[in-house]
Image (tube, rainbow, N blue to C red):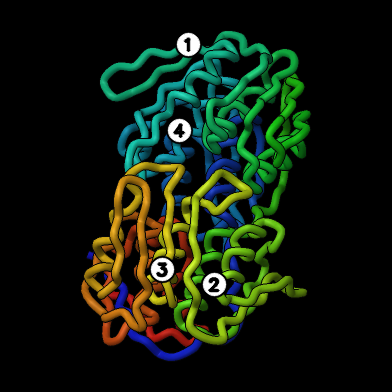
Amino acid sequence: MERITVRPNGPLAGTVRIAGAKNSVLKLMAATVLAEGTFVLRNAPRITDVGCMTELLRSMGLAVDRSADVLTIHRPAEITPEAPYELVEAMRASIVVFGPLLAREGWARVALPGGDDFGPRPIDMHLQSLERLGATFETAHGYIEGRAEHLVGTRLLLEFPSVGATENALMAAVLAKGETVIENAAREPEIADLAAFLNRMGANVVGAGSSTITVEGVEELSPVEHEVIPDRIEAATFLAALGVAGGELVLEGARPDHMDMLMQKLGEMGVRTSSHPDGVWGMAPGRLTSADISTLPYPGIATDYKPLFVSMLAVAEGVGIVAENIFAGRFRYVDELVRMGADIRTEDHYAIVRGVPRLSGAPVRAHDIRAGAALVVAGLGAEGETVVADADHIDRGYERFVEKLRAVGADIERG
């Protein structure tokens, strides 16, 4: 069992290089099935989920090679458009291969997705959008089989601005005949990064990053080189670590324009942030002040930020109310923080966090990527030793997490 051990060691100081975005690179990798030839993705993070997507693409017949932070992906003329259970079960993002496979191959067989365990996240919107474009689906024996002899552009109105549903529809629409308009589309920076990648390939996508995306279908696409945007969730994690441990950091490569609401809320709590020539600068001069947090679709507070905020609120002065408006059941890590002496009460999709002066180190368990990172963050400000079990969850979304924290002054080790 993988473990991370954390001990308090005073304020953090130095520079952290922010890796490429997990939530972007996986979708860019999926999009490579749209065109025959060789793609180059730069600033690709070394994380477990990229390894999973690599194996998924290889299972379909693509060649994937890595050198440092560069992925080279060759898509041959013939591939097998199937995503097997053992790979999809490990990573929910695998479902985004459906749109590009249907658009390019006309059919796809994909296992029902797995991923982090924090409540149901139905894929109905993904399938409904693809059906509106002309696909048909059958489900049997744990797999979904889709067919699409001809995809035709249409108007898609999403019930909710789902990132995955937007991405699947977008990747299918680029090769559909005619115009597709996606309304109530997700607005995340990762959507804009995917659209930029597709446009570089020869697609005609307008409006990505807004709530209305218009796609004019083209007949074919070409392979390209592309640099993955920086990971705003990783940047948020180091700002949260700064909030708990104190100190001053520069987050090299981070994009402040991707984190406006986050930085505003951190400012309310006492973490000073600003743009920096190299990325984002942050400083935490003293104990944090509590604030209320509500998760909302972008540009609101991301649900991936929430466990980090709960860890900060656990040691802040005052009482903060946290509302989870995106995913049900994403409070499992609260019991672990309570083991560390946090005063947190949950009810439905709310958590009431009464800050205590100091947490107490304890053995805890990571249930998912961000919860695991949040427990490490909490351990930076806890008295004594905190041991986070099942730390391999963290590896799914963070590159060299322990090494990066140690380099800026944290007393942390693996194993």
Task: Name the quarter where the N terminus is drawn.
Answer: bottom left
Labels 1 and 4: the sequence-earlier one: 4
How far apart marks 1 and 3 lie (CA) works out to 50 Å
Picture coordinates of residue 94, whole percent (x, y): 45, 37
Q: Nearer the viewer, mark 2 or mark 4?
A: 2
Labels 4 and 3: the sequence-earlier one: 4
The numbered disc on residue 319 is 3
**Residue type beneath disc 4:** Ile
Determine whether label 1 and label 4 are within 8 Å by CB. Answer: no
**Residue 404 appearing in the image:** no
Picture coordinates of residue 155, whole percent (x, y): 67, 17
Q: Nearer the viewer, residue 398 or 357?
A: 357
Residue, disc 4: 95
Residue, disc 2: 269
Per the image, label 3 sits on a secondary structure element best described as strand
Per the image, label 1 sits on a secondary structure element best described as strand
The residue that appears at 52% across and 86% down in the rendered structure is 286
Q: Nearer the viewer, mark 2 or mark 1?
A: 2
Q: Is residue 279 above or below residue 63?
A: below
How far apart marks 1 and 4 lie (CA) works out to 16 Å
